[in-house]
């Protein structure tokens, strides 16, 4: 496997400009995002008050709504002037939120530190059911698009996401996980929804298969890059800057690329350390620090971000068929933003 | 509220014939059920072996597959000769199984006795995710029916089921639950899927709205009757005969009609008993026996079955628009079977 050195895939010269790419995208689609936000509130409502209460815990907790944003930006990129993408952007966000809620349902032994997931506040059962509710509402919104093609894309997306998450469970704690298997997992659990979020805009705009394929590829590679960086950040996030705890994956024994590479490149002694901490989950104070040191020694966090750059470049190239526009500029900038939030 | 005496709604003279109604229905649709079974196996399969393993635990555990049976019988009733209902019958069974899996995810404090639910074998997280997988596969099957009307029915059914289950959670332990609220819960969590299972056969057969409405009404009232009897059986199942433990609802503090009626009809002392055991969940040895005695005293298990007879009669009347046929005879017989399994 190649081991690219830092910085040679995507030029860093636009670094400062990129950090504001999300802002640029947000202002381009502000009106439509307001419609999506209104649809989210309307469609997560229910006379059963526990539902909006619990769903709102996650939905209003201030994420960037990156996935619906991608649907709206894609629609703008191809000059779609209809309204069918508003419901679909909402559906995409609901699928994402439902996935997060179900991800929060863990067994007592695996409760994460440093977070207050929905299941700790309301219990496992309501958390599962409100996730189901959002899935169902997502399906209803998809059906309202009146497009069987959209329905095929999003229903198969849901199945793949779930399959990917189950695959991830079965590879958890397995240090022999290959980079290929890891890519399969993150493609399924993250990238496929990014891809669908972009692709459905092309479908409702009826611009042909080339446009759909380009949008889908952009979303897919962006999603892979996004997840690679997420997994890297879990070992080096600047807590004060990003409000994110580090070490969750380590504590859960979730095998991500920084560890896969460090395990492969490590000495016998280092491998014994990884087996004790991540397979047997016998962790002591100081182990996270030791793990971070080993990743640093082998440069695997930096290499993971390098891999992300590679997929980021592919995402950008997928947009080559579209002519220059503010939407295209924003979508290109968002790729760099997703990668550079690592710094 | 009226308090009908036993046996005056539906004649009992066909009792013996009715017990074999399920057998009759099964033999009428045996070939198509074989296709459904093959589709179930094929569509719950995955390269991620945990999925068929966990899903198979429930799916192969020998339920009668009443819901897909209703789809097939409804199709036969209206002489549908196509194949689109096979995938839909499978989708209906997947939705049901996913619901059961998610129902098994409970909090440690609420683990049910006398059962080995999937989450106790595989843990909460895989159980949730395999439920999600089945939901997604159900949705894919629905999309393959190429009918937006079917998709509208089944996606809204999913949302209503989930909403009903959440409503049930919020009314749990609440002895002030009215019969009306209780009916709302069981309609949402059980009857709506029975209704959809029947209705979709009418939709793919394209026989018009009267047929669809009749099938939907049959399924809905049968579903209400079915759940009423289920809730009655929880207090008087003959364990050796039905292989069902009694008292699960009591131990969980789930407020069902036998208790709603007994609480309402009870003395102050009896109400204090119900509050201690079902609201505060402070239960001692002998409490289930005491509860059963109180239900007996007020005749509320028998009255619950009487209510079921009422809805059973409505289910039968819904079929009045169809001419006599073996399928109609079987569908009428199944109503009595569902009610009389109480004896």
Image (cartoon, coloured by chain):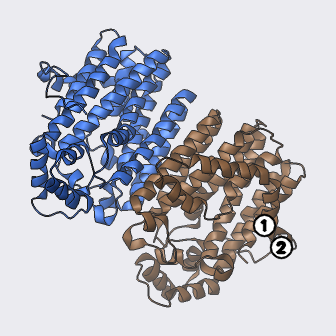
Chain colours: A blue, B brown
Instruction: Find residue B261 and report its horizontal and vertical position in percent.
Output: 59, 75
Q: Where residue B283 sits in the image (x, y, percent)?
A: 43, 84
Expressed as whole percent of the image width and height from the top left, the position of residue B341 reads: 72, 72
Q: Quadrant of the N terminus of chain A?
A: top left
SS under mark 1:
helix
- Position of A282 relative to B215 (above/below): below
Horizontal relation, residue B62 to residue B291: left or right: right
Of all residues, the one furthest to the top in this rendering is A323
The residue where tag 1 is placed is: B336
Q: Quadrant of residue A189?
A: top left
**Residue A208: percent from left, percent from top:** 50, 15
Instruction: Compare residues B114 and B213 and report the one nearer the observer.
Output: B114
Q: Which chain is disc 2 placed on?
A: B
Q: Residue furthest right?
A: B324
Which residue, as the protein is rendered here, is positioned at the far front? A268
Q: Answer with the quarter of the image where residue B185 lies.
A: bottom right
- First in sequence, mark 1 or 2: give its number: 2
Q: Which residue sits at x=13%, y=22%?
A: A12
- Give residue A105's mark: none
Q: Label 1 marks which chain's residue?
A: B
On screen, residue A122 versus residue B248, left or right, reads left
**Which quadrant of the rendered structure holds the C terminus of chain A?**
top left
In the image, B280 versus B92, the foreground residue is B92
């Amino acid at each position: 496997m190649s081991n690219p050195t830092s910085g040679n895939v995507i030029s860093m010269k636009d670094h400062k400009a990129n950090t504001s790419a999300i802002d640029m995208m947000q202002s381009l689609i502000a009106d439509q995002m307001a419609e999506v936000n209104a649809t989210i509130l309307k469609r997560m409502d229910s006379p059963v008050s526990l539902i909006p209460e619990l769903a709102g815990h996650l939905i209003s907790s201030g994420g960037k709504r990156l996935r619906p944003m991608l649907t709206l930006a894609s629609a703008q990129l191809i000059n779609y002037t209809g309204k069918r993408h508003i419901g679909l952007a909402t559906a995409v966000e609901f699928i994402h939120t439902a996935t997060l809620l179900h991800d929060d349902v863990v067994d007592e032994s695996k409760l994460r530190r440093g977070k207050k997931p929905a299941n700790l506040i309301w219990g496992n059962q309501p958390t599962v059911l409100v996730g189901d509710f959002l899935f169902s509402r997502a399906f209803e919104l998809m059906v309202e698009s009146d497009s069987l093609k959209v329905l095929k894309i999003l229903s198969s997306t849901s199945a793949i996401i779930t399959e990917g998450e189950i695959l991830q469970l079965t590879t958890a704690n397995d240090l022999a996980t290959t980079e290929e298997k890891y890519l399969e997992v993150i493609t399924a659990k993250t990238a496929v929804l990014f891809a669908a979020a972009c692709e459905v805009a092309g479908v409702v705009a009826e611009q042909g298969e080339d446009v759909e394929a380009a949008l889908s590829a952009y979303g897919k590679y962006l999603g892979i890059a996004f997840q690679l960086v997420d997994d890297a950040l879990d070992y080096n996030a600047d807590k004060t800057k990003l409000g994110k705890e580090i070490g969750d994956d380590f504590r859960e024994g979730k095998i991500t690329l920084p560890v896969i590479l460090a395990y492969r490149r490590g000495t016998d002694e280092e491998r014994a350390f990884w087996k004790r901490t991540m397979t047997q989950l016998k962790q002591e104070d100081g182990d996270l620090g030791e793990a971070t040191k080993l990743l640093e020694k082998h440069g695997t966090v930096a290499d993971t971000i390098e891999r992300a750059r590679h997929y980021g470049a592919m995402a950008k190239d997928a947009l080559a068929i579209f002519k220059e526009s503010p939407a295209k500029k924003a979508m290109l900038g968002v790729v760099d933003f997703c990668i550079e939030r690592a710094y």
